[in-house]
Amino acid sequence: MSASQQPNPAMPASRVSALDRQIDEMYTPQSFLQRAAASMLQARYPVVAVVFLALIALCAIFATHLAPKDPNRVEIFLTLKPPLSTNREGDIEHVLGTDSTGRDVLSRVIYGARISFFVGLAAVGLGGGAGTILGLTAGYLGGRVDDLIMRLADIQLAYPFILFAIMMLTILGEGVLNLILVLGIGQWVTYARIARAETLVQREREYVEAVRALGATEWRIMFRTILPNILTPLIVIASFNVAGVILSEASLSFLGLGVPESVPTWGAMLANSRNQLLSGSWWLAVFPGLAIMFTVVSLNILGDWMRDFLDPRLRGSGQGL
Amino acid sequence: MHKYIIRRLLLTVVVVLGVTLLTFLSIHMAGDPTFFYVSERASAEERQAARERLGFDRPLHVQYFDFLFNLARGDTGNSLAHRVPAFDVVMERMPATLELTIGGFLLSTTVAFPIGVLAATRRGTMTDGTLMLGAMLGQSMPSFWLGLMFILFFAVTLRWMPVSGHVPFIKPLLEGDAALALSNLPNAIRYLLMPTVAVSVYSISRNSRLIRSAVLEVLRQDYVVTARAKGLNERTVMTRHAIRNALIPIVTVLALQFAFLLNGVIVVETVFSWPGVGRLVFDAVSQRDVPLVLTAVVLLSFLFVSANLIADLMYGFLDPRIRLE
C-alpha cells in the first residue's frame, strides 16, 4: 500500500484518479451505516444474502398470509403429488407437491421458516448473553469465580453437544422454549471464552483505570465501561452462530426432538421424507433441505462480510466458521 | 513438559467426572426411572420392590459414588434394558461409530489439505473462487440432508450404492480375526462410502477454508519472501517453508474437529440405519437406562477429551516456541 501511495510518473491517469477518489473517500466523514452499505455493495455476495434472508424473514412473519394452504391440512386423496402436478381442471394446486398425508409442501416450507428463524435468534441471544456475562465476570473478577466458570466451560466442551441435547430434550420434553434453552446452553462457552480473553486485555487499559479513579462501582466498570469495548468480536461470532444453531435445530427436529409434531419444521419434514425416499418422492427431501441450505449459506456469507468489515483481525483465526 | 501432561491428565479426570455428575443428575431430575421398568398397573409394593431391585431406592449420592467406585474397578453395571454389562453393550456398537468417525476424519483431512493449499496458491483466481464457493455451500448443508440426497441419487435413482446397511471391519479386527476383516473390507467400504462423505463434507469445507487462510498467513511472512528472493523454486518454497509452518494452526483444528464429526455421526447414523452408538444412546435416554447412558457418555467424552489433549501436545511438538506449562 505504501508503495502505491508514492507519486509514480509511470502510473496511468486512470489509476491516479482512482487513487484520488480513494483518498477523497478516506477524508470524507461517513456514518457507520454508509460505510457498511458501501462495503456491502462492493463485496456483492452479502447483498444477495441480505435479500434472501429478508425474504425468509418475511415468510416467517407473514406465514399465515403467504402460505397457500393450511400446513397441517390432511388431504388423503392427494397424497404424494409431485410438484406442479395438475388437478382435473388443469390447475396447479400444489406448487411443491404434497407429502404422504397430502399436506402442502410449499406451505410447510414457508411455516418452517418460523421455527428456524425464531429458535436461531433466540438461542443465540440467550447463549450469547449468558456467555458474555459469565466470560466478562470470569475475566474481570478472576480467582475462584474465574476457575469455577472456566472449569464448567471445560466440562461442557468435553460433552458431545448432540448427546447433551438428546438427553435434555428427552427429559424436559418437547416445546419451543425447551429447544431454545438447550440450544442456548450449547452456545455459551464460545462467548464466555472470547469475552473472558478480551476482558483480560481491556481490564488493564488506562481508560478502565481512569473510570475506577473516578469512583465508578465494579458493576459499572464491567457493564458500562468494558462491555462496549469487547462487543465487536462477539457480534461477529453471533452472526455465524445463528447459522450453526439453525443447523443444530434441524438435526434435533430430524431426530424427532424439539417441537411437537403439529409444528412444521424443516428438520421434521426431512425426517418424514426418509420413509418416502424409496418410492422416489424426491420433492419431500429436496425442498426443505434447500431452504435450510440457502438460509444457512446466506447467514454465513453475511457473517464473513461482517467479520471483514467489523473486525478484520479475526480473519483466518478459525473463529465463527 | 511432563508436568504439563500430568496436569492435563488430571484435568481430564476432573472433566470426565463433571460430565458423569451432570448426566447422572439430569437423568434423575426427570423423575423416578423405576416407572420405566414396572408395568403401568403395578401396585405400590411392586413398584417399591422394583425400585429396591434396581437400586433406585438409595440416596442419590450413594448411587452416584457407587457408580464411580465400580467404574474405577472397570465395572459399569448391567444395562437395565439389555440385562448385560453396559460396557459390553456400548462396545458392541462402538466399532461401527468409530469406522464412520475415523473414515470421516481421514477423508476430511486428505481432501481438505490439497483444496486449501491450491486455493491459497491460486489466490484471487477462478480456481480459488470456485473452491471457496463450494466450501461455503458445503458448510451450509446439514449432513443428514446430504445423506438423504445421496440415498435418493446414488441408491434409489442410479442404483449404484446400497440404501443402508453395514459390514463390520473394525470389530473383527479387534476380535483378532484379521482374515475376516480383510475379506470384509471391500464391502465395508461400499457401505461406508455414502455415510462417510455425508459426515465429512462439513469438515472438508471448514478445514479447506482454514487451511487456505493459514497458508496465506504464512506466505506473507518474511522468511517466505527471503526463500523466494534467494531463488528457490515455488515448489520448494511451498513445501519446505510455507506448508510446514502453516501446519501448526491446522493440526489443532484437525484434532478439534473430532467433536464436530462425532456430532454429525450420531445424526447420520439415523439416516443410514447405521448400528452405532448414536441410536443406542438415544434409545437408552428414552428408556432411562441409567447405567447405559452413563457408560456411553463417559466413553464418548473420554474420546473427545483425549482428541483435544493430543491436539494440544501436537501443538507444542510442531512449534517448539510454544512452551506448554
Image (cartoon, rainbow, N blue to C red):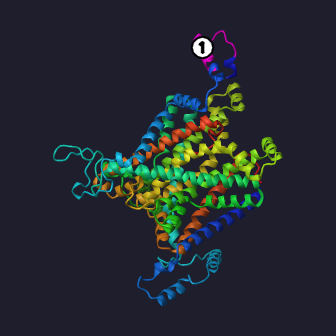
Residue B184 quadrant? bottom left
**Residue A321 visible in this rendered orientation of the protein:** no
Amino acid carrying mark 1 in the image: Ser
- Residue A84 position, x and y percent, is 25, 44
Quarter of the image where one finds residue B163: bottom left
Which residue is most to the front? Answer: A215
Q: Helix, strand or loop at disc 1?
A: helix
Screen quadrant of the C terminus of chain A: top right
Q: Quadrant of the N terminus of chain A?
A: top right
Q: Residues within 10 Å of mark 1 (few under 14, many from 20)?
A: few
Residue farthest along the top direction in this orientation: A9
Camera-nearest residue between B4 and A208: A208
Residue drawn at the location 62% of the way across and 29% of the way down: B234
Q: Looking at the image, how many numbered discs can be counted on the residues?
A: 1
Q: Is residue A213 left or right of residue A12?
A: right
Q: Is residue B181 visible?
A: yes
Q: Does the magenta-highlighted stretch encompass residue A16?
A: yes
Between B231 and B222, which is closer to the camera in this rendering?
B222
Q: Which residue in the protein does label 1 denote? A: A17
Q: Is residue A249 left or right of residue A33?
A: left
Task: Please say whether residue A84 is one of the residues in the magenta stretch.
Answer: no
> Furthest residue to the bottom?
B45
Whether A49 is drawn above or below B25: the answer is: above
Point out residue A236 in the picture as x, y percentages from the top left corner: 60, 42
Q: Residue furthest left?
A: A88
Q: Which residues are magenta?
A: A6-22
Which percent across, then down, holds residue B127? 50, 31
- x, y percent for residue A120: 50, 51
The numbered mark 1 sits on a residue in which chain? A
